[in-house]
Amino acid sequence: MKTLLASLLAACLLAGNAFAQSTQPIDRIVAVVNDDVVLQSELDRATSNVLAQYRKQPNGQLPPADILRKQVLERLILVRLQVAQAAQQGIRVSDQDVDAAIGNVANQNRMTLDQLRANLAHDGVDFADFRDSLRDEIAIQRLRQRYAQTSVSVSDAEVDAAMSAQANGMQYHLAHLLVALPENPTPEQIATAQKKIEGVKELIDKGEMDFATAATRYSDSQNALEGGDLGWRSSDEIPTAFANMISSLQPGQILGPIRGASGFQLVQLVETRSAAQAPANAQMVTQYQARHILVRVDDKTDDAQAKAKIDTLRARIAGGADFAQVARENSDDLNTRPTGGELGWFNSDTYGADFGAQVAALQDGQVSAPFKSQAGWHIVQREGTRQVDATDQNRRAQVRESIGQRKLEESWSRYLQQLRGEAYIDIRPADSAATAPTGG
């Protein structure tokens, strides 16, 4: 699994900076993305950094330069679209958020901030660009989290069924290759995509190219540059379209082409293991029971208005108003509002580290001062604490998260395709001023 530094560096390398450094004599626009642009300098920088990362991997194989630059440019375009969408939804990333993320990167890698700066400089990454890309990555993460909260749900019955299947089940290490289709594709587009993926499959079958190299060169998935690696999956985490077929494969075998919601796919079974071989994670944890009231910051309510409202609600409760009644009448959390803001029992990190720290600092029955999270402004009333053996709870949480991630991957991929399809995208090749724009 990648370290946090590697993941964030990858985000930095791909997100880049919207503006070239002032020392650049000439900078060319390589793509127009709605009201934004991608510059030649940042595409060059991102491509060079991807090459540098792969040179550190003994078996790293990359596609030809023109295909690599196309893939990197596509990632830059998707970053632009997601950051713009986050801004439209009122998602803001403060300097303090970025500072905290940088501190986490340094701590995860046992570095001081000066050492982190030095490492980035050694790899040719400008620290200001790193900050900007972290800001974009945080915004995208928050956009994805908000999308997951509104679009993805996992029932207790699904968790129960998955845990039962896992008890004596297998886990599968998978990789995939996607030839994407647009929403509502034409017969010609379907035929072209099918011909392409059948051609790629033939190359793999003949031994002219291994699966990872083919995925790197030809996949339209966001993980193409990682060879299409999906990591370890249990049966509940595998799309139902081919979950049953995966279990009949031998390691190294390939399933497909299969037509799915996003396009045509090839799926390779890399290796298997029994569920008993999966790492265990048993521990005792402190849980809290609490109520909360949320006032969201969005396009209708700015930060100052939200803060003023939460201050007023806190004053009412301090004056003797019932917390639960105030929550039922005023909270913007539609899930907990009917129950007076009741969150039930939860771990300190369930709703984020900052939220957990606020609850942990209270005494039972005490109400917090207003505080801000990525969702908006909160006040919390702690109702109780307990110590629990989290073994089964962790397993359920992991299974729930796995199912949710599988659903989110499928849904998020379609969402990004829709976002791109509706955008104005004008990609400009090096040998001409422009090509016909795509999207709405």
Image (cartoon, rainbow, N blue to C red):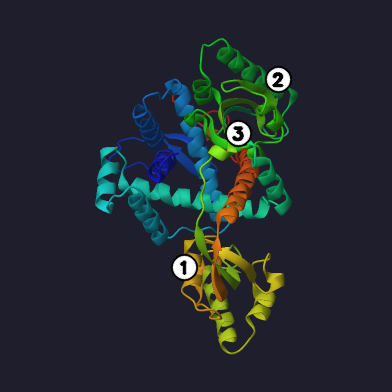
Q: Nearer the viewer, residue 257 or 251?
A: 251
Image quadrant where residue 162 sits = top right
Marks 3 and 2, how far apart at CA: 20 Å
Which numbered dot is residue 386? none
Mark 1 or mark 3, whichever is nearer to me: 1
Name the spot of residue 11 as percent of width and height, x first.
43, 42
Name the spot of residue 126 as percent of width and height, x first.
31, 44
* Quadrant placement of the N terminus: top left
> What residue do we see at 60% from left, 66% from top?
345
Q: Is residue 32 above or below residue 305?
A: above
Q: Is residue 27 left or right of residue 331?
A: left
Q: Is residue 181 visible?
A: no
Category of crowding for the residue at label 1, using alpha-carbon neighbours closer than 10 angstroms: few (below 14), some (14–19), many (at least 20):
few
Q: Nearer the viewer, residue 388 or 27?
A: 388
Mark 3 or mark 2, whichever is nearer to me: 2
> What residue do we see at 56% from left, 9% from top?
206
Dot 1 falls on a residue whose secondary structure is helix
Disc 3: which residue: 438
Disc 2: which residue: 191
Q: Is residue 154 left or right of residue 351?
A: right
* Quadrant placement of the C terminus: top right
Disc 1: which residue: 357
Is the C-beta separation of discs 1 and 2 under 8 Å?
A: no
Q: Is residue 41 left or right of residue 262?
A: left
Name the spot of residue 151 as percent of width and height, x first.
67, 51
Mark nearer the N terminus (1 vs 2): 2
Dot 3 falls on a residue whose secondary structure is loop
Image quadrant where residue 177 sits = top right
Category of crowding for the residue at label 3, using alpha-carbon neighbours closer than 10 angstroms: few (below 14), some (14–19), many (at least 20):
some
As shown in the figure, which amino acid type bears the numbered disc 1? Ala
Mark nearer the N terminus (1 vs 3): 1
> What residue do we see at 55% from left, 85% from top?
315
